[in-house]
Amino acid sequence: MEKGVDCTGIIEKSVSDQDYQELRIAAQCILDSVFYPEEGFLYAVCPTAMQERFGVTSHQLGHVVVELDQTAGADVTLFLYQFEDGSWKGSLRAKCDLNVAKIASRFGGGGHVRAAGFSYQGKPEKAVEKVREALKAQRSVQ
């Protein structure tokens, strides 16, 4: 800042400012999301058909899990989005003492205790089911 770097501008361009279509698809993902308050689990799915409808690519969806993770009562958030080849990327976030890196490792992925990811081939409903089972298993040993 002392050298005249526009820190505010950099933050706005890299974090705050989002393309209008990116905001619209995030809103749609949130509208279509499913929340299990008794489990503290929230998930959303974004297939390629939705991405095409909004004119965005899978590379423009990283912010959606951050938006979902702000939901009160959602201890664990899962965002699944599809790539053009049909495979899925799963992004997990935790705001509690559950280890989402352990869950991601079940799919061959990894990450940190509070933020992890994995790749998945198959129906997204099956991935959601497996994540919920893993969360229940972790809770039962605590």
Image (cartoon, rainbow, N blue to C red):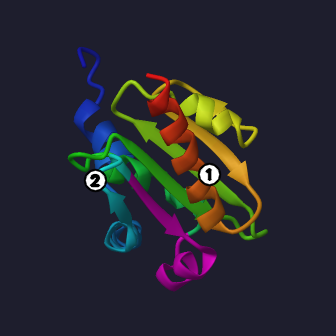
| Residue assigned mark 2 | 37
Residue 28's place in the image compared with 98, above or below, is below
Between 128 and 81, the residue placed more toward the observer is 128
Q: Residues within 10 Å of mark 2 (few under 14, many from 20)?
A: few
The numbered disc on residue 46 is: none
Q: Residues within 10 Å of mark 1 (few under 14, many from 20)?
A: some
Residue 98: which quarter of the image?
top left
Disc 1 element: helix
- Name which residue lies at 23% across and 45% down: 73
- Asked if the stretch drawn in magenta spans residue 111, the answer is no
Query: Where does the image place residue 12, in percent across and percent down from the top left?
Result: 28, 45
Mark 1 / mark 2, whichever is N-terminal: 2
Between 116 and 129, the residue placed more toward the observer is 129
Query: Where does the image place residue 50, in percent across and percent down from the top left?
Result: 52, 79
Q: Identify the magenta region.
A: 42-56
Horizontal side of residue 76 vs 129, given as left or right: left
Query: Where does the image place residue 62, in percent across and percent down from the top left?
Result: 49, 51
- Asked if the stretch drawn in magenta spans residue 50, the answer is yes
| Residue assigned mark 1 | 130
Residue 43's place in the image compared with 50, above or below, is above
Seen as rendered, the residue at the extreme front is 140
